[in-house]
Structure formats: C-alpha cells, structure tokens
Amino acid sequence: MEKQKDVRLNKDFRSAYIKDFRGFLERQTNNPKYQSFLESRENCKGKIDSAFKTAQAVLERRFNPTDVSDLRRLQNKYTTVDSVGKDSCFYMAVVDDKGKAVKELDSDRDEVTKQKHFDFNLKGSLNGSEYDRQKDFAYAWYREEMKANGLNPDCNIEHSDNQSNPALHGHQNNNEDWLKGSSGSSSNYVNKWNNDFALDIIGTGGCRSRAIPCSESEFTTFEMMHLAKQEVVKTHQEWIGSIVRATKIVSETIQASKFKSEVDALAKTYNWEPNVSIHKTFGTALTINPDSVKSMTDEILGYKTQPTKEDKIKLAKIELANHLQAVA
C-alpha cells in the first residue's frame, strides 16, 4: 500500500460529501427513472384535462346550464334558496343506452351498480374511495416548486419504513402549510387547483347522495385519470427511492473512507465534482474500489450496465446447460 500525504476526513466532512452526492444524483436529468417521472406527469396532465372535459359534459347533461343559471340567480336574490353550488368530486354510475344501471360483481361476488367516486381535488383519492385522502400526488406534482422553497416533497419516500418519525411529521406540516399558502407562499396551491377543477351541481348533501349517470366510455376516461395520477406517484417513488438506496451505498463507502483521496477516486467514476470545503490534515490513504460501488448504484438507478467477461461466461454456461437439458 503506497503511503501519501492526504486530507483526513472527519464526521462533518463525510456528512457534507454524502449530502452533496445526494444532490448530484437528483440533478442527473439523464436518469431513466427521472425521465419516466417527467413523462408520467406530462401524460397525467392530458388525462386530467380529458377527464375534466368529460365530467363537464356529463354534468351539463345532468344539470342543465340554463337551470343552474336560473337557480344561481334566485339563490343570489333570496337567502333562503340554497340549491346550486360548485364541487370537484362526484360519484359516477354507468348506465346503458336506455338509461338502465349497469351492474358488476364486487369483491364478494355480489352484483352491484357499477359506480365509483372520482375526485378532481389535489389531495383527492387515487383509487375511487371517497374517504382516502393522500398527499403523495401533490408532492410529486409540485416537487420543483417545493424544493425551491426549502421544503422536502420526498419525505414520504425517505421515511417509508418509519411513518412515526418526528422528522417526517415536521416535513409534512411544513409542506401542508406551504401548499395552503399559510407559510408565506405566493399561492394557495390547494385552493387554486381545486377551484380550477370545480363544476356546477344542483342539489344538496354529499357527493354520495347524487350518483351521476355516465356512459361506459366516459367512466373509462375517469378511470384513466386515476391510473395516470397513480403512475405519477409511482414513478416519483421509484426515482427518489432509487436515489435513496444508491446514496446509502455510497454513504457506507464514504463512512468507511479515512481520506479525501478515497472520495475523490469514487467521485471520478461518477463524474461528480463534490462541492465540499475542507481543511487539510495529513495521514495515510487506504484503497477502495470505486468501480464496484458505481456498478451497484447504476443498477439501482436504472442505468444499463454492460456484463463483465465473467458474467458472459456464466450466462453462456447456463444457456448451454439449458440447451443440453432440452435435447436430452
């Protein structure tokens, strides 16, 4: 082992390197998982717009716009009238071309009306349950804006194995305040989103009390919105989850390193230029294998890696054995 003068690392230096590496991975726009995340959001926007346009047509067919206008005029004139308003969530029930309710089998194999709850609200359910509120879609949708304001939209992913962590609750509270505009943010993203996707309805009571008839194709359009929103959450989780796992591997390597040269060698394999300022102390550097570390993280992050010569030989032996077994 060759001895050389080097910068000795301490706990603070290692922590700074690990934090800087995490940021480096997040900035890699060629990451296939990041590209999938961006594509899912772009696709989702189209699905939401299509579903909302369809919902508008369905509701105008159910609640005549002229009647809505007349009732709103009377409501504004007489305080005792309260029969029209805005809503962003609806129960849609499938009917056939004769207006008869379409039936389907539920999980208990009982025949029930084919209907589902569709919520256009920012925190609305992604699975058709009226009471299943969630934050993940908002965090994924406004991720860049939240990061730019010092928030952590990735907190649910980072703490997926420990939902009771006080740090998670702190991040969630800060995120909630910002999304609602109660922490000095320039816009109430929750209200703005919900208002943009509100439609006129006639009647009182909750959305469950007014299942609105729609066609099978219209129902499918609403379900496509659910699937698209689920995909946004899923790709966000896969992208950031892979970064968390890759950072953990590199973190363990950095924690085991004693000197700056070891981290420099690791950084070189990633074309990562650490933005870490440290003071020099001297000692003896040990040897690490940065290529093996990068190989592990490349697989986690979704980059395609070329098989080694040993891998090719192993695969060839397996293929030969399978062939001999097949012809035997």
Image (cartoon, rainbow, N blue to C red):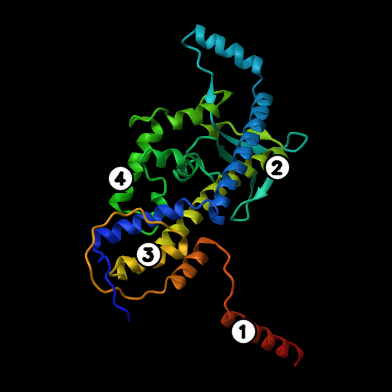
Residue at figure coordinates x 50%, y 41% from the top left: 141
**Callout 1: few (<14), some (14-19), or many (20+) C-alpha neighbours within 10 Å?**
few
Which residue does the numbered mark 3 point to in the structure image?
Answer: 264
Secondary structure under tag 3 reads helix
Image coords of residue 134 (percent x, y): 45, 44
Which residue does the numbered mark 1 point to in the structure image?
Answer: 313
**Callout 3: few (<14), some (14-19), or many (20+) C-alpha neighbours within 10 Å?**
some
| Mark 1–mark 4 distance (CA, rounded to whole Å) | 52 Å
Callout in the foreground (1, 4): 1
- Residue 108 against residue 73 in the figure, above or below: below
| Mark 1–mark 2 distance (CA, rounded to whole Å) | 58 Å
322 left or right of 189?
A: right
Mark closest to the chain's N terminus, 1 or 3: 3
Residue at figure coordinates x 29%, y 77% from the top left: 3
| Mark 1–mark 3 distance (CA, rounded to whole Å) | 33 Å
In this view of the protein, which residue sits in the foreground, 78 or 298? Answer: 298
Q: Where residue 170 is drawn, which disc sits there?
A: 4
Callout in the foreground (4, 2): 4
Residue sitting farthest toward the top? 77
Residue type at tag 3: Asp
Q: What quarter of the picture does the C terminus occupy? A: bottom right
Residue 199 quadrant:
top right
Residue at figure coordinates x 33%, y 45% from the top left: 171
Residue type at tag 1: Ile
In this view of the protein, which residue sits in the foreground, 215 or 284? Answer: 284
Callout in the foreground (3, 2): 3
Which residue does the numbered mark 2 point to in the structure image?
Answer: 102
Q: Are marks 1 and 3 in contact (CB under 8 Å)?
A: no
Image coords of residue 312 (percent x, y): 62, 80
In this view of the protein, which residue sits in the foreground, 67 or 57? Answer: 57
